[in-house]
Amino acid sequence: MNAPGRSSLAVLLGGLALPLGAEEWHVGAGRPFTRIRDALAVARAGDTVTVHGGSYREGNLVVDRSLTFTGLDRPRLDGGGRDEVITVTASHVTIRGFEIVHGGTGSLHDLAGIKVANASHVTLEDNRILGCSFGIYFSKARHGIARRNEIIGAPAAGPDNGNGIHAWSSEHLELAGNAVSRHRDGIYLEFVTDSHIARNRVGECLRYGLHFMSAHRNVYQENEFIRNGAGVAVMYSREVRMEANRFRHSWGSAAYGLLLKDISDSRITGNVFEHNSIAVTIQSSSRLLLEDNQFQGNGWALQVESSSTDNVYRKNNFVGNSFDVTTHGELELNRFEGNYWDRAELYDLDRDGVGDVPHRPLSLFARLVDRVPAALLLLRSPLVHFLDRAERIFPTLTPDRLFDPQPAMRAHPR
Amino acid sequence: MMLRIVRYVAGDILRGRIILAYAGCLLVASLGLFNLGGDTTKALIGLLSLVLMIVPLVSVVFTTAHFYNTQEFVELLAAQPLPRATILLAQMIGVMLALTAALLAGIAVPVLLYACSATGLTLIAVALLLTAAFTALAFVAAVLARDKARGIGAALLIWFYFGLLHDGLTLYALFLLEDFPLEGISLTLLALNPIDLGRVLVLLQMDVSALMGYTGAMLKDLLGSGTGIGFAVLVLGSWIAAPVLAALWIFRRKDL
């Protein structure tokens, strides 16, 4: 039962000096073991436990040694609606190829499909986790990887419905290529640092697609967030990079694509915001750079609270939004540079691609609506159209220093 | 008898150049909007502005002008043994039918071709109802004023009030009363202007209610549901029926 070809395991185990003599244990009907629990009990660190197709209902399985735990033909692990299905307490564990269903819900402890607690270098890949309270749960984990997992929650569970991927007090995680839907939050990160979240698809979650609190120095790339309750919320974090994500269809009276609250020194670049009630709402955030983003068909593209300072909005496209910018302050310390505004009325005599007159993105009507929301009743009324035009020519009620001095004549290519 | 007068009035208008020009302009505008942008939602929004401003304007001006131009015909009819209500009602229905025909050719056909959705159908319905309402309102102005210039002036004033002034007053009222619950007030202000009511009906179909926050949710509840649409159509209907009845009442007592 030697497995000499397990070089990847050898690499993974690194200094653990166990690659030689690693054994592979088989579980399944007509195999040496019929119960996973028995195989896990005899396997030593460095071994592989391979589970063959079938359904296994063994309550809570604890992986407390550095094992590779693999499912062949997608065996189904059933938590019976009572237990956490897999709990990993050892480092250097790999779990792949399982279908995990019916995880329990706990009122004292958060029970998950797969929980990784106090362990490092744990890899969870190609699993399918259905109807569990929490899908994947990292607690005080370092260098954990979750990739290509499919996680679908059971929203009917109401308050018992946990988060798809939940990480707490962890660092250097890599969450990539997962598909998460119908959980409370799709991906929830709290006190998680130096992590990389990429190419995940998160949809139809009850609250946020991605929610992070006090999670610094993280990078979010090429994720897609569709039809989540309130989009993505980023709170109390520093040095965040959000690149090339897609925020779509967060549509409802309190819904937004991206909420930035108490964020600083972060870059939001190359993202697409499409058909959200509010694409980006910025509260008490400073030193942000929003560059090369596409705002299309949103209710409000940017809603900036006056407590936000030193932010730069550069080379974004604003196309077909009901309102481009709204604020109740002056936004004196925010700079708009070289954006494309589809409703700007510009001319370009020297043909350098930059409008010769500045554009004022904050319309009078946006200002009025900000004061009395019921005024939205007059959306697209001819009167409002005339008022906005008059205000653009002679600004009286809108802040006269809020303008884009170099508006682009054409949309920036994407 | 009434049917014959209606047929005569409508046929007379439809043979004229003005109604043809109206239909042609609408058609060119709608086709332009649908073909230029590419995005049907954008085109429908442009068409909505057209329906809210141009359709009422043409309705009132055309109606009053037509009324004064056919005054001799009306006097001739009044000399016959016909009830006055029949004469005026036939005139009104004839004008409404002619304007409706222009609207169907100029807006309904392109909308059905390019954007046959709930929004498009609502837009067509709103355009038709607004045409009828403003034709009826213009008839009130026309039967009240003996002088052609004053009649057309009054009709234009009606258009100006509902098209712009009412919205300004609405805005002012909402700001004055911002500390009070505004649902009832805003709904009342909406119902008091057929143009606003039509605009909100179309916007609700475009699902912008989410933007309107609480007000939008309330409007969606009130006007977006089946009963709500019924209510709105009822209000718009009374915006047609009330001026029709008023015009008939005045015309019956009028010294021709």
Image: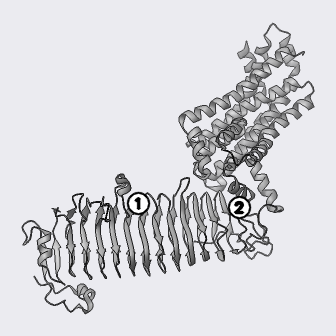
Chain ID at mark 2:
A
* Residue B224 shown left or right of residue B179 in the figure: left
Q: Position of residue B26 (x, y in %)?
A: 72, 42
Figure quadrant of the N terminus of chain A? bottom left
* Residue A149 seen in the current view: no
* Along the line of sight, the residue nearer the viewer: A61 or A200: A61
Identify which residue is drawn at 84% across, 29% down. Answer: B64
Q: Name the secondary structure under disc 2.
A: loop
Q: Residue A343 bears which disc, if any?
A: 2
Figure quadrant of the C terminus of chain A? bottom right
Task: Work out whether mark 2 precedes mark 1 in sequence or the reverse, and give the earlier one.
Answer: 1
* Along the line of sight, the residue nearer the viewer: A90 or B23: A90
* Residue A251 seen in the current view: yes
Label 2 with label 1: CB-CB less than 8 Å: no
Identify which residue is drawn at 76% across, 25% down. Answer: B243
The mark total stands at 2
Q: Residues within 10 Å of mark 1 (few under 14, many from 20)?
A: many
User: According to the image, what is the colour scheme of the structure?
Assistant: one colour
The residue type indicated by label 1 comes to: Arg
Q: CA distance from mark 2 to mark 1?
A: 38 Å
Q: Position of residue A266 (x, y in %)?
A: 56, 78
* Residue A226 shown left or right of residue B117 in the figure: left
Q: Quadrant of residue A305?
A: bottom right
Residue ranking furthest to the front: A108
Q: Name the secondary structure under disc 1.
A: loop
The residue type indicated by label 2 comes to: Arg
- Mark 2 or 1: in front is 1
Q: Position of residue B57 (x, y in %)?
A: 79, 38
Identify which residue is drawn at 60% across, 44% down. Answer: B204
Q: Which residue is mark 1?
A: A184
In the rendered image, the vertical position of residue B168 relative to residue A228, given as above or below? above
Marks 2 and 1 share the same chain: yes
